[in-house]
Each structure stands twice: as structure tokens, then as C-alpha cells.
Amino acid sequence: MKLTWQPIDNDGNAAGKPVVLALSSPRRGPGSKIVLESSWLHARLTETVTYPRAAEADQFERGNVQTTFAALVHCEFASYRECSQWCARLGNLLSGRGNLSVAYEEGGVDVLPRAVWQQIPVPAKLGLAVTINFTFTGGAVN
């Protein structure tokens, strides 16, 4: 699996160089960024209307679709310094909005458009490696 973040401007046009967050090869060693697990969460905005003395409430769909993608990525580096710098600068690499591309080894690509990252907790580094849990939220998947 390959995860790529393409920063975009307010009109949806590319606004900077793409950032590769994960790549399925090399599998081990310096430079490896392997997706250990990933998940999708799809949500639709709804509204609940209750009526006085009614037996039940009505649900109305508002049509807005929100998709959340989460991935646990294991990254290995050539030096502790390189690992520390990448972790410290990660938030700046992914600033603003972007399109998140998820390319599968078997073929095919899903794009989470107009996405923003919600959180990127960076746990303690284990020597030359760190495992990061990325969470992105955007519109409907293309």
C-alpha cells in the first residue's frame, strides 16, 4: 500500500510537492514506511426530528458525506537524528488541506478528496524506528 498526500489550495488545485507517507517497499531497513493496518469510516449527516407526544422520532438524511481514513505506519530510518527530524516536521509537511491517495499493491487507487489530518500522535521512538497512527477526514471517496 502506498499513501500519498498532495497539498491543495482553496480551489482544489495542487499546491506543493506530494508527500509519500507510506510505501510498501523496501519492506525493512532505512527508508521503509510500511502500513501495518488501515481502516475506513464512512458517516452521513442526519437530523433527528421529534414530535410532541409521538411514539417515535423521524430521521432525515442531509446528504453530506464524511469519510475518515486511519493508518498505522511503521517507519525506519538510517539515523536517530533523521527519525527525530521527520517526526518533528511531520505536521508541517501535511499543513492545510490535501488529497490523500491510497494505492493498493493489487492495483487500484482510492482518493480521499479535500482532506485534513485530524491527529498524528507520534509515540516514543524505538531507536531508529517509530510507529505513527495517521487519521485523515475528508469528503466522499473517489
Image: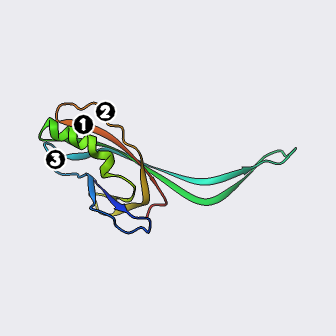
Of the residues under marks 3 and 2, which one precedes in the sequence? 3
Residue appearing at x 27%, y 45% in the figure: 89
Q: What type is the residue that disc 3 sits on?
A: Gly
42 or 98: nearer the eye? 98
Separation of disc 3 and disc 1 at Cα?
12 Å
Neighbours of disc 3 within 10 Å: few (<14), some (14-19), many (20+) = some
Neighbours of disc 2 within 10 Å: few (<14), some (14-19), many (20+) = few
Q: Are marks 1 and 2 in contact (CB under 8 Å)?
A: yes
For residue 109, say whether it is visible. Answer: yes
Residue appearing at x 52%, y 55% in the figure: 66
Q: What secondary structure is found at the residue carrying circle 1?
A: strand
For residue 74, say whether it is visible. Answer: no
Residue 31 percent across, percent down from the top left: 16, 47
Q: Up-down: is 110 above or below 127?
A: below
Q: Up-down: is 104 above or below 12?
A: above
The residue that mark 3 highlights is 31
Q: What type is the residue that disc 1 sits on?
A: Val
Q: What secondary structure is found at the residue carrying circle 2?
A: loop
Q: Are marks 3 and 2 in contact (CB under 8 Å)?
A: no
Residue 130 percent across, percent down from the top left: 24, 36
Q: In which quarter of the view is residue 7 placed?
A: bottom left
The residue that mark 2 highlights is 123
Neighbours of disc 1 within 10 Å: few (<14), some (14-19), many (20+) = some
Residue appearing at x 68%, y 52% in the figure: 47
Separation of disc 1 and disc 2 at Cα?
7 Å
The residue that mark 1 highlights is 130
Q: Up-down: is 123 above or below 115?
A: above
Q: What type is the residue that disc 2 sits on?
A: Pro
- Return the mark for residue 91: none
